[in-house]
Amino acid sequence: MGNRVKGRVKKKSIRAASHSGMSSKRKLSRMGKKQKKDHAGLDATFIGRSACLKKLQISLKDFRRLCILKGVYPREPRGRTPSKKKGQVYYHIKDVRAIAHEPLLQKFREFRGFMKKVRKAAGRNEKDEAARKESYAPSYTLHHLVRERYPRFVDALSDIDDALALVYLFAALPSTGRVASKITKKAQMLAANWGAYCATTSSITKSFVSVKGIYLEASIQNCKICWVVPHAFTQNIPSDVDFRVMTTFFEFYETLLGFVMYKLYNDIGVRYPLPVTGADVSNSSSVLAANLHVFNKILQSGGSAASNAVTAAVEQQTSSNMDESDGAKDSNSKRALLKTVNDALLKVQGEEDENEDDDEEDVDISAPLKAALESMNRDEENTVGIGNSVTLDDDASKRKRLFAGLTFFISREVPKGYLELVCLAYGGKVGWEGKDSPISIKDPTITHHIIDRPKLPSSYDSLPKSREFIQPQWILDSSNFHFLLPTSKYGLGVELPPHLSPWVDNEEEGYTPLYAEEIECLKSGQPLPNDVIENEISSDDEKESSVQSEDKNVAEDGTTSDEEEEEEEEGEAEKKAAQQKKNTDEEAQKL
């Protein structure tokens, strides 16, 4: 019984209140467990940034990097703020627990300890020891984070808009102290790889030039991807931008784009990354041109459709002949395979008019070859890749046929990057002023010469007269409307029509610009509306009036100049007469 005295009331538990008549067990069963502070509600759900740093035992710099790489963002609690603290940054407790179990957190701690050793050796002036330790720096990869954040390929493909915008931005920035040269080169290579794929698969659907840059949109596997390409100007790096945060984003986006482009290139049978060397980049005018050159070389080396069709036809006809013939004619059928593809093609086209002897050694492959070539011509334009090639959809096939048969030449004052991308995506051929250009400036096959000058220089007089000189806006407007617009409104020195955005829905806005109506009438073959005709007449009248006023001003300037010259001559004659009179008066006084 212990110290309990018989007949005395049992003492209450210490945990129960002194004024309560219930024991602690009875009170817990009736009223529930008493909640401790910061263990329930908003105070337990959201945690401040300083508490996160204390809980994870890392610095603010490493915490920011982990949040960016893991995709963790601050949360704003609904209703009241935890602990009645306004203006503070809060994170969800589940996000903090996920960061606590991240393998990168241990890597960051190892790297912090490694840097302490390097600084210690450098402080002792042991430079060799510090350089030796630098080779043992801890390394890490972000592959598991990409697989964790994007479990499906479609999820990653639909979320690369920001990644492409940042990559193109770093590709346009100069390599200064805050932007390392290796980051700039890597961004240029990623942008060139993406552009080469979009140009080859005819994925570019929309383009628009604005003050901020060139907006482009691509359709890949039914996903709309939009990004911004900065203008080709000298970029001044602002001082109020934290490039450490942007570099962390680029680190993750580099891994994400690597995953996405490996899958896209693998679908068309091309190995990624492309084997582009430094010599290829140095010998090209741009990184995109070098990547396109290597890309096309790989596609051509994989075997063209014509050679594959000829090979299949020869093998099929040879196998049937070998089954019918005896074993003694095996050597003759093998010798028949030595006929070249050119001979077979010439036989199909009928260019060989002479009758050849019908020997038993010859194998007739003209009939199966002709059938194979006819089927190949129908499918060759709609397929891209090597081996397991990808078949383009109907929209991509229409885009590829828009500029088919047209050859563009880009003058040196025109930015080549996005124009080359759009021209190639819509089936055209592109040349430029440079040693690596596939087309010379004097090539007679050039149909459109893109130039951005008020008038042609005298050096262009020797060029062929079969080409048309246009401004760059013609390329973008024709691709956006999927129609070859008249070049008369885009000639040199001509006031350009309005550059309409392809993302604006005229029916939803309730207003259709006059130029859009004019283009729709041209596409459908209908007569132009009266508003468009009146607008063109008024614009022509304004131009004529401006020209007449300029001529009038010039004529008035000429007449006024003539009057001024006459007045000056009269004044000089009066001065001479006055001087002569003065001289005669002086001589008369002397006499």
Image: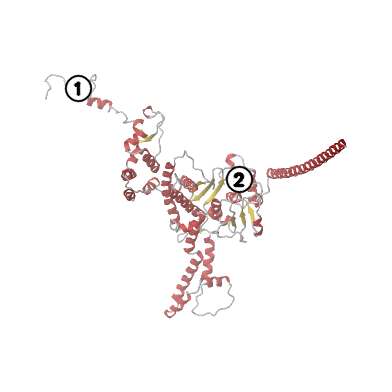
The colour scheme applied to this rendered structure is secondary structure
Q: Position of residue 432 (x, y in %)?
A: 57, 56
Q: Nearer the viewer, residue 504 or 109?
A: 109
Q: In which quadrant will I find the C terminus? A: top right
Q: Please rate how many residues cluster around mark 1, counting C-alpha atoms within 10 Å: few if below 14, some from 14 to 19, many from 20.
A: some
Expressed as whole percent of the image width and height from the top left, the position of residue 403 reads 58, 56
**Mark 2 falls on what kind of element?**
loop
Task: State the image coordinates of residue 148 (x, y, percent, origin top left).
Answer: 37, 46
Does 556 sit left or right of 166 as displayed?
right
Say which residue appears at 54% left-offset and 65% top-offset: 374
Relative side of 302 to 567, left or right: left
For the residue marked with disc 2, what is the amino acid? Answer: His
- The answer to whether residue 1 is visible is no
Is mark 2 in CB contact (under 8 Å) with mark 1?
no
Q: Can you give x and y, in whole percent of width and height, for residue 398 in the image?
A: 56, 54
Closer to us: mark 2 or mark 1?
A: 2
Which numbered marker is on residue 199? none
Q: CA distance from mark 2 to mark 1?
A: 87 Å
Circle 1 is placed at which residue position? Answer: 12
Residue pictured at 54% horizontal, 69% vertical: 370
Label 2 neighbourhood size at 10 Å, few (<14), some (14-19), many (20+)?
some
Task: State the residue in front, 212 or 441.
Answer: 441
505 is higher (above) or lower (below) than 48? below
Is residue 57 among the parts visible in the rendering? yes
**Figure quadrant of the N terminus:** top left
At mark 1, the secondary structure is: loop
Q: Residue at x 36, y 41 (%)?
A: 62
- As drawn, the label of residue 499 is 2
| Amino acid marked by disc 1 | Lys
In the rendered picture of this protein, how many numbered marks are placed on residues? 2
Labels 2 and 1: the sequence-earlier one: 1
